[in-house]
Image (spheres, helix red, strand yellow):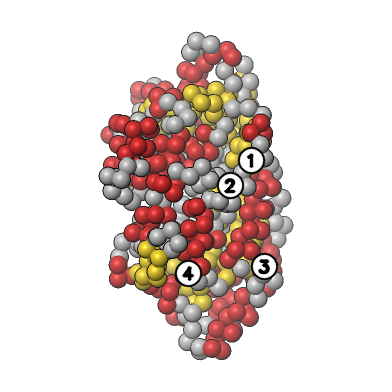
Amino acid sequence: MKTKTVPVTIGSVALELNLPAKTDVLAMKTAQLLSDPAATVAQALKAPIAAPPLERIVREKLREKSDAQAVVVISDNTRPVPYRGESGILWPIVKTLMDCGMESDQILILVANGTHRALSEEELEEMLDPSIFAAGIRVKNHDCRNGEDLVFLGQTSRGSQVYINRDYMRADLKILTGLVESHFMAGVSGGRKSVCPGLIGEQSTYIFHGAPLLASPQADLMILQGNPCHEEALEVAKMAGVDFIVNVTLDCDYNLTGIFAGDLEKAHEKAVEKLREYTTIPIEHEYDLVVTHGGFVGLNHYQTAKTAVSAALAVKPGGKMIIAADITDLDPVGSNNYRTVLHLLTLMGAEKFNKLLLSPDWTFVPDQWQVQMWAKVFQKIDMADLYYYSPQVPARDYQIIPGVNGNKFLPEELWYTGRPETIGLFIENAIRSCLETPGAEEMTIAFLADGPYGVPVNQTEGQGPT
């Protein structure tokens, strides 16, 4: 079999993959990087989009109230937001607050964990600029299950009971930070998502991430218009109030391509426009086999659902999919709720599972939304046609994960070793296995080089997502 070598970084490991020569390598366009990220960040704070400069906003708050409190909301470590180094966006924001007269005890860094676990001190120190800790700025995790840390704001037009982080609501100045990338439910991340789901109570997810809302065809990658998930998140964010946002866009190597500061909606819209320039990948047809990976975000099986949904845009109905992920999270699968519902999907199959989820007898289970996204994939391909591999997943967990256990494509001595360098061998052997099936000589193959970040758009089906 003739092959071609394709370099790729999957999580922490850089690989040289030997792919069949006929493989179409689908990649995002090359985005223009910022030549001077630090200067661009400073300029964005001074000349934001549809908002006064951050310095003016801070000084006005302090004139109204000398001991005004500021909260700066950050993403957790499932998003590669540049919070440290030369491209860091966090310290310039905090320094602006302090230069305007705020003391360190007037500033809180609040981690928008959503329903994810809290980050440890070590994880926070690794993620954030050392200047934050040197300045004595408080850093706190949001806890969606601690009722004492939540405030009830009311009900959305769709009926969500809105509970928001108490520290956020107490703050006189509310600043959101985050990454704008494609998102398989809300269309894109960033903006309003720092508040919803970032800072909401668990019970506030029941409609926002409920089965009926996520069953909408508009709740999909790169779609905002008519997307009920986006609309619900935006409504909640407006109820809670936002004074200023600082969002970024990145290329496939996590380098800055844009800084978008200012108004909650207008700055976010500009970031989305930038993202569309290079993340959508035009394709002329769907493929019999799609090979992809979890990238940075695929740090556990829960997050790798994003990879599968993106790949499903490129695979033929009844086709095959190969997914590899270099998992770095403490739990390689996800929460107990996620594990339970995922096991249901594995046992029942997508059709019966979706009927159960949409049944009036079903009781909402937190984290069911991510399993619903996996079920979306299995409405297009058979569960037995997904080959999934992460070297960090132990044997017992593969029993609840849908699809074929990728270890079977490795020599037995390499099973469950936790060694990321085995990923390349898995991919090559899994492809070889697919090519040994009857009629495989006609099989069309695509490799999604950017994993979950690139969004395939079938040109034969119209204009694509908006």
Q: Are marks 2 and 4 in contact (CB under 8 Å)?
A: no
Q: Residues within 10 Å of mark 3 (few under 14, many from 20)?
A: many
Picture coordinates of residue 134, whole percent (x, y): 48, 73
Picture coordinates of residue 138, whole percent (x, y): 42, 73
Q: Residue at x 49, y 18 (%)?
A: 434
**Where does label 3 land, which residue?**
49
Give the label, 1 or 2, closer to the camera: 1
Left or right relative to 437: residue 414:
left
Q: Residues under labels 3 and 1: Cα distance?
A: 27 Å
* Residue 382 placement: quadrant: top left
Along the viewing direction, whichever of 329 and 208 lies nearer the viewer: 208
Tag on residue 455? none
Q: Residues under labels 3 and 4: Cα distance?
A: 21 Å
Please state which amino acid type lies under the numbered disc 3. Answer: Ile
Q: Secondary structure at mark 1?
A: loop
Q: Are marks 3 and 4 in contact (CB under 8 Å)?
A: no
Please state which amino acid type lies under the numbered disc 4. Answer: Met
Q: Earlier in the sequence, mark 1 or mark 2?
A: 2
**Where does label 1 land, which residue?**
464
Please state which amino acid type lies under the numbered disc 1. Answer: Gly
Please state which amino acid type lies under the numbered disc 2. Answer: Met
